[in-house]
Image (cartoon, rainbow, N blue to C red):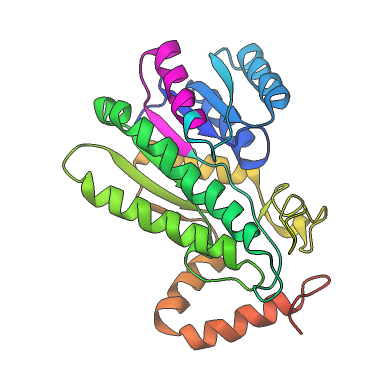
Amino acid sequence: MNLKNKVIVITGASSGIGKALAIEFANRGANLVLGARHYVNLCTIAQNIETHQKVKAVAVQCDVTVEQDCAMLIKQAVLTFGRVDVLINNAGISMRALFKDVDLKVLKSLMDVNFWGTVYCTKYALPEISKTKGSIVGVSSIAGYKGLPGRAGYSASKYAMNGFLDALRVENLKTGVHVMVACPGFTASNIRNTALDKSGKQQGESTLEENKMMTSEQVATIIANGVENRSRTLIMTTQGKLTVFLSKFFPAFLDRQVYKVFAKERNALLR
């Protein structure tokens, strides 16, 4: 797919990977419909893109946990541009708490954003993307292949996203709709700062070494290339590829290795 003049809808576009995706797709000549809850930030990003990249960018206030917001996001794309070529389901939140300690409302919040947000947006975008034989993308995680300690709700939501998109891909084998799952490794963004603790409050600081992670810009480049190439799955790091391999063939060994890694994080939940 040549992205020039294509219409791309991105959720969670006000920061992190979503913002980087908006800039990357704009650099490739695409027009954008950007959705997020933080409308002021979103408008600033859209204005900067229109000024510097010379493409059209529309900001739409959207909470992906609200079905009607998702419907309006897609409706605005069609009203403005008359079409939708690509939907990037990027909006997401994380958590950090052991399951035995966590309030169940935290898990529900993660499912509402990460899973149901993807379902809602995809439901309303699919009829339009079917017309253009475009792409539906889910920004997932290695946590969708291997459950991570202290992130039970996050892993569950990403497993659910992966299963949903996998089924959608099979349903659309004959329609021309492309479905892609993108799984970054740990990425330097604000997702860990805004991760929910056991009571549902943002933890406020990362417990991992952000300076050793992929950048949001690197992730955005890989995803944009994947859309152009109509890739099926993107596992973006060597560590991620090794995790997927070990989960299939040496799952008990992988359990022990994952435990060791998370037992070393700052203020570790595991001992």
Identify which residue is drawn at 75% across, 60% down: 199
Q: Nearer the viewer, residue 123 or 106?
A: 106
Q: Nearer the viewer, residue 78 or 244?
A: 78
Whether residue 159 appears in magenta in the rendering, the answer is no
Identify which residue is drawn at 32% across, 32% down: 134
User: In the displayed image of the protein, which residue is found farthest to the left?
Assistant: 174
Q: Is residue 246 above or below residue 193?
A: below
Q: Magenta part of the protein: which range?
A: 69-88
**Left or right placement of residue 3 versus residue 169 in this view:** right
Q: Is residue 99 above or below residue 179?
A: below
Whether residue 71 appears in magenta in the rendering, the answer is yes
Query: From the image, which quarter does the C terminus lie in?
Result: bottom right
Q: Nearer the viewer, residue 228 or 16?
A: 16
Identify which residue is drawn at 22% across, 43% down: 172
Q: Is residue 110 above or below residue 47?
A: below
The answer, for residue 184, to whether it is visible in the render is no
Query: From the image, which quarter does the N terminus lie in?
Result: top left
